[in-house]
Image (tube, grey):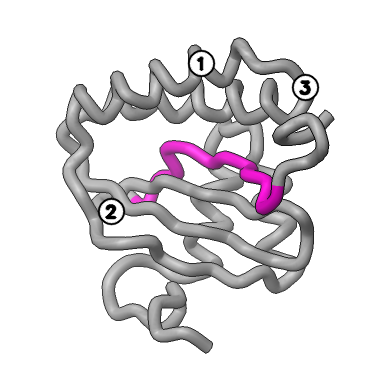
């Protein structure tokens, strides 16, 4: 196991706390991400915690708008979860957050942004590992 895995880290919460935070949220990907955790998918913290700024929130709003213009159900699913993230970032500017990856045995993984202070899941995006013939998925 890699030393960046959540269970091995002294700061932050572990797998069960992440699962609880996801299920307590209203995020559209909460149940599928929690099921991935239940199935034993690997959990890894990505980088160090950082302060959420209004600029960071605006960046995700722009990304969401761009992804919304792309065709295909996977793109639309990603757009919806990115819109959720952008809104939560806007409402929580000034908090500290961290990225967490849930990776398993499928063609996708989940990227979760959560508050360091509260443990709340601020966003959860299902991301394809490799593009399909149409550039992302049908």
In which quadrant of the rendered view does residue 91 lie? Answer: top left
Q: Nearer the viewer, residue 11 or 47?
A: 47
Task: Give the Cα distance between marks 3 and 2.
Answer: 34 Å
Where does the image place residue 93, in percent across and percent down from the top left? 21, 29
- Tell me if mark 3 has few (under 14), some (14-19) or many (20+) residues whose alpha carbon lies within 10 angstroms of its own: some
Q: Tell us which disc is closer to us: 3 or 2.
A: 3
Residue 87, visible in the rendered structure:
no
Q: Which mark is residue 116?
A: 2
Q: Position of residue 92 (x, y in %)?
A: 26, 29
**Residue on which the image places disc 1:** 66
Residue 129 image position (x, y, % from top left): 66, 53
Image side of residue 73 versus residue 126, left or right: right
Mark-to-mark CA distance, 1 and 2: 28 Å
Task: Label the magenta part by its dominant secondary structure.
Answer: strand
**Residue where numbered disc 3 is placed:** 72
Task: Name the element at disc 2.
Answer: loop
Please tell me how crowded label 1 is: few (under 14), some (14-19), or many (20+) other residues with Cα within 10 Å. Answer: few
Q: Earlier in the sequence, mark 1 or mark 2?
A: 1
The magenta stretch is: 119-130
For the question of whether residue 58 can be seen, the reply is: yes
Q: Is residue 120 one of those drawn in magenta? A: yes
- Helix, strand or loop at label 1? It is helix
User: Residue drawn 38% across and 61% down?
Assistant: 46
- Along the line of sight, which residue is nearer the eye, 116 or 78? 78
Q: Say left or right for 107 vs 59.
A: right
């Amino acid at each position: 196991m890699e030393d960046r895995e959540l269970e091995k880290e002294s700061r932050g919460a572990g797998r069960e706390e992440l699962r609880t935070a996801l299920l307590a949220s209203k995020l559209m990907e909460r149940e599928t991400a929690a099921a991935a955790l239940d199935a034993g998918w690997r959990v890894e913290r990505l980088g160090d915690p950082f302060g959420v700024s209004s600029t960071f929130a605006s960046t995700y709003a722009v990304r969401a708008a761009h992804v919304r213009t792309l065709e295909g159900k996977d793109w639309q699913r990603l757009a919806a979860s990115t819109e959720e993230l952008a809104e939560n970032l806007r409402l929580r500017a000034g908090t500290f957050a961290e990225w967490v990856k849930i990776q398993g045995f499928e063609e996708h993984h989940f990227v979760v942004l959560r508050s360091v202070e509260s443990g709340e899941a601020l966003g959860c995006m299902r991301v394809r590992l490799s593009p399909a013939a149409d550039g992302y998925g049908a």
